[in-house]
Amino acid sequence: MVSRRKLAVSIGIVAVAAVSLLAANWAGAQGKASSLPRNQLLITSGTAWGAESNFNPFGGGWATGMVGLVNETLLRYDPLTDKYIPWLATKAGFNGKNYVIQVRNGVKFSNGKKLTAGVVVSDLKFGAIKTAYWNTLYKTVKKLKVKGNTITVSFKGKPSYIQWQNLMWNLPIVWPGQFSGINATNFTTLGSAAGWAPIGTGPYVLDTSASDPATGVVWQKRSAKSWWAAAKKVASSPAPTYIQDLVNTSNTNALEGLLKNIEDLNNNYLPGIQTLVSKGQAQTYFPGKPYDLAANTAWLEVNTAKASSPALGDPKFRRALAEAVNSYKITGSGDYDGITTVANQTGLLKVWKKWIDQKQVNKLGFKVADVTAAKADLAAAGYKVGSNGFVNNKDGSKLSLTIEVPSGWSDWEAARSIIVSGERAAGIDVNVVTGSQGQVQTTDRNQGKYDLEVDNAYQISDNPWTYFNGIFHLPIITTGSGQTFANYGRYSNPTAWAMVKKLDQTPPTDVKGRKTLLSALEKVELTQVPIIPLWYNGIWSQTQSKYWKNWPSSTKKGMHFIPCMWGGYLQMTGIDTITHIKKA
């Protein structure tokens, strides 16, 4: 998926002055798209941090909008109502232990070819390629049976109910002929060569004459009759004839683009957005605190397997670490100042509230922002204060930890300072290490070369299984690139991992069984503290209404959608944002 990297911008006298001084930076920023009529062009930014030249929806880093605007999914998911939305499939769900898909009639790809059950099966079978991200899941399939427009999927054993349902609203449906040469080697790179024009069922196609990889991708609308959803009155035909997503360049330019009405929708993190909203220069989903919907939980990642820092493997020490952090100060002051909120101690997002065993949280949770409690827990666990004023390891050796966040992520840097202050006040020596995003996350986090990090890898989804899979996933990989998608804390608990797998194989109709398993997993989290949930990160979104209006808002009836272009968000309700906005 495309990157959801933060952008640090300070909104104040210096930044406002920069708007005038650097206006020239926007000259030509649109590249070839500068000739397009502005009142027909929706301009977005805040997703891409490099050339938008990858048109392969199966790999990471695809051009913004690929999945959602061009390649659609069988289902969509609305996290605000916790409901699946029939899309390329009129129905898709489990019937006992079989998964049944009813492919929608009358859908055509942009090349004029029909969407059929056979096309969907061909796409599903790409999972047999070992580098496909659903390869492990596809191996559980016993048979794919087609009868008319109905596909029945049977499985070799107990179905992975949660993973399969999640795949149905995340797997992009492509025209198989365009990917006839796909294999394990080129699975994520096919479609990156110049001249590739993606074929999809969505409302837009690539505008090859206006797109410029260096400045941004441009999509051109298909006619209302050409897009099945508009023709069948399932959705409105989008108002923008063109959509351009600009490649991020600099912090100042991001702010300038919004203030100068160059961008219509910005999905960067802009600290101080409260000021712009109060002056009517921008809109956010909520008119006041917390301004944005929550996308994920930010937590303090603890490297539980760090041999040189044995205290990190002690749950009692990790509990003291958690108690020393003043999450209220992080969310209520500094960069955030009310645009985020303190996370539930399970780390589960508000959309998963029904799965949280709050009575258990109240009983077993740690005390937030309580340095005194942290000191008491350290002493009770056998950590004694040394001559330097900080606690030592239990064997008497020096205990000194490091903490990392990507350089330039100002909100996380501000949070890091508060974290360090709290830990040192509790008697734990924590020191700052700086590094680029690649160094901090790809190298140090993935390969286990860190002590403490702030992280938010597990995103909003249709089920908290995705969150607990991220925390407890086994086995732990110690070779090559290391942990590339889950369990960055290298916490090994086979019992918890067995419960995660059992949760995946619990039928969706067994709500009681799911709640029991989730409560048990939450208990492990609360007592063992493998990670330390701190605050809810927002779906950063700022809009202006010079050219386009009717943006999603918590205060507008019928406009409760996610205004975001990030990878994975258009097939939630991001596409509804596009189909509901109107010319100003």
Image (cartoon, helix red, strand yellow):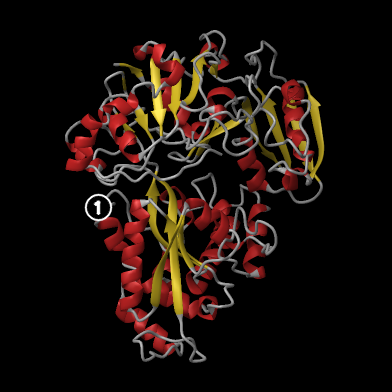
Residue shown at 41%/15% (left/top)?
239
Nearest to the observer: residue 15 or residue 527: 15
On the rendered structure, is 234 left or right of 584? right
Q: Which residue position holds label 1? A: 337
Residue shown at 27%/33% (left/top)?
283
On the rendered structure, is 129 left or right of 509? right
Q: Position of residue 76 (x, y in %)?
A: 55, 32
Q: Quadrant of the C terminus?
A: top left
Nearest to the observer: residue 141 or residue 332: 332
Q: Position of residue 276 (x, y in %)?
A: 22, 36
Q: Is residue 155 above or below residue 281?
A: below
Q: Quadrant of the N terminus?
A: top right
Residue 12, visible in the rendered structure: no
Residue 8, visible in the rendered structure: yes
What residue type is disc 1 on?
Answer: Asp
Residue shown at 74%/24% (left/top)?
176
Residue shown at 72%/20% (left/top)?
116
